[in-house]
Image (cartoon, rainbow, N blue to C red):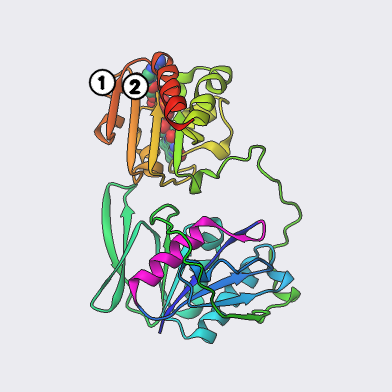
Amino acid sequence: MGILVLCETDGGQPRKSAFELLGKAKALGLGPVTALVLGPADVTSLGGHGADAVLHYDNAVLASHSTGTAVKAIANAVAATGASVVLGSASNVTRDAFPRLSARLGAGLAVECTDLRVAGGKLVGRRPVFAGKALVDVKVQSAVALFTVRPNSFPVAASTGATAPVTTGDGGVSGSDVDVKVVQTLAPESKQVDLTEADRIVSGGRSLKSKESFDAVIRPLAAAVHATPGASRAAVDAGFAHHGDQVGQTGKVVNPSLYIAMGISGAIQHLAGMRTSRIIVAVNKDPDAPIFQFATYGIVGDLFEYAPLLQAEFQKTLA
Ligand SMILES: Cc1cc2nc3c(=O)[nH]c(=O)nc-3n(C[C@H](O)[C@H](O)[C@H](O)COP(=O)(O)OP(=O)(O)OC[C@H]3O[C@@H](n4cnc5c(N)ncnc54)[C@H](O)[C@@H]3O)c2cc1C
C-alpha cells in the first residue's frame, strides 16, 4: 500500500514538479507517501511538501539518467516499500523509464495525466487524448499502477517545515547496469525556466517574419510577463527560434497557467502542445483564426501594435 513518488532533481535539489506530486499524493489519502530520489541530492525539503518517508538511493551511478539503472532502482524501490501506486512527472526520464518499468512490473501505466482523483479506493488519472480534443479517465487494474503527470497540474503549497525519515541505499544498481552513458551535459544558454515546467509562456509564430523581430518582440514581452518564450513550428522552421523552444505535437508539451500566443494560427499540432494551459491569450489579426476557439481572451489585431502595449502594462503590473 501507499504511493511512491519519483522526485526528480536538478542541480542537487528536488524539481518543483516533485513538490507538486508529493502534495497531491498526500492529499489523495491512499496511504503513506514515500519520496524516491535517485542519485546524490539534498532531500531535506521533501518532508515539508508531503513525504512521510524518503528513500534516497544516494548512488553516484544514478547521478545521470540511464534506462537500465533507473528502471532497476525504481523496481527495487517498489519492492522495498510495497507501494501500489508510483507517480512521476511527465518528463524525459519517465517517458524513457516508465514504459519499461511497466513491462517489468506487469503494471498498468497512464501517462501525461493532468489530474488525479480517487474513486472506489482506486486512483483515477485524467488525461488528454487525440491531441487534446478529448479527456479520458484512466483506472489501472493491476496490483501496481504507474501514473505520470504533466508539470504545473497541481499547485505547490508552502513547506510545512516537517521532516521525514530518510532511508539511504544504493538502489541495487552498479556500473554494469548503465546502458546509456552520458558523455556531456549542455546547460541551456538562458537561465529561464524550462518550457515544460514554465508557469507562464509567451509564444510567437510565423507572423514574426524574422529572427530579429522575434528577438525584438517576443523575448522582451516574455521578460515583462516573467514568462519563458516559446514558438510555433513554423517559427522554428524559419529559424526565428531554437527547436528547444517549439511547442506542440513534435515540440514540447506545456501546461502553464498563462499562455500568450502572438500571431499563431492555432493548428491542431500546436494546440496538442498547449491546449491544457489554464488561461490562453491570443493576438491574431484574423478573427477566424482557430486559436480563438480555445482562447480565454482574444485580441483581434496586429501583434506588432499590441505586443508593446501588453509589454508596457505587464511591466507596470509585475515590476
Ligand atoms: C506532423 C506535423 C507535426 C507538427 N508539429 C507541430 C508542432 O509541434 N508545433 C507547431 O506549432 N506546429 C506543428 N506543425 C505545424 C502546424 O501544422 C502549423 O503549420 C504551424 O503550427 C503554424 O504555425 P504558425 O501558426 O506560426 O503559422 P501560420 O499557420 O502561418 O499562422 C500565422 C498566423 O499569424 C497571423 N498573423 C499574421 N500576421 C500577423 C500580425 N501582424 N499580427 C497578428 N497576427 C498575425 C495569421 O492570421 C495566422 O493566423 C506540425 C505539422 C505536422 C504536419
Q: Which residue is mark 1?
A: 287
Q: Residue furthest front?
A: 161
Check residue 89 in the rendering and tell me which mark sits there, or answer none: none
Q: Residue at x 31, y 50 (%)?
A: 130
Per the image, is 115 magenta?
Answer: no
Quadrant in the rendering for residue 126: bottom left
Q: Assign ligand 1 to one image quadrant.
A: top left
Q: Which of the pair 100/211 is nearer the observer?
A: 211
Residue 193 locus on image (x, y percent): 55, 44
Quadrant in the rendering for residue 303: top left
Residue 291 locus on image (x, y percent): 31, 31
Residue 164 locus on image (x, y percent): 54, 77
Asked if one can make out residue 143 in the rendered structure from this viewpoint, the answer is: yes
Tell me: is circle 1 under 8 Å from ligand 1: no
Specify the amino acid type for callout 2: Asn
Specify the amino acid type for callout 1: Pro
Tell me: is circle 2 under 8 Å from ligand 1: yes
Q: Residue at x 32, y 47 (%)?
A: 132
Residue 224 locus on image (x, y percent): 49, 28
Q: Are marks 2 and 1 in contact (CB under 8 Å)?
A: yes
Q: Residue at x 66, y 66 (%)?
A: 41
> Within 10 angstroms of label 2, few (less than 14), some, or many (20 or more) residues?
many
Q: CA distance from mark 2 to mark 1?
A: 7 Å
The residues colored magenta run 11-29
Most common secondary structure along the magenta stretch? helix
Q: Residue at x 35, y 56 (%)?
A: 114
Judge left or right: residue 275 versus residue 243. left
Q: Which residue is mark 2?
A: 284
Asked if one can make out residue 109 in the rendered structure from this viewpoint, the answer is: no
Q: Which of the pair 199/143 is nearer the observer?
A: 199
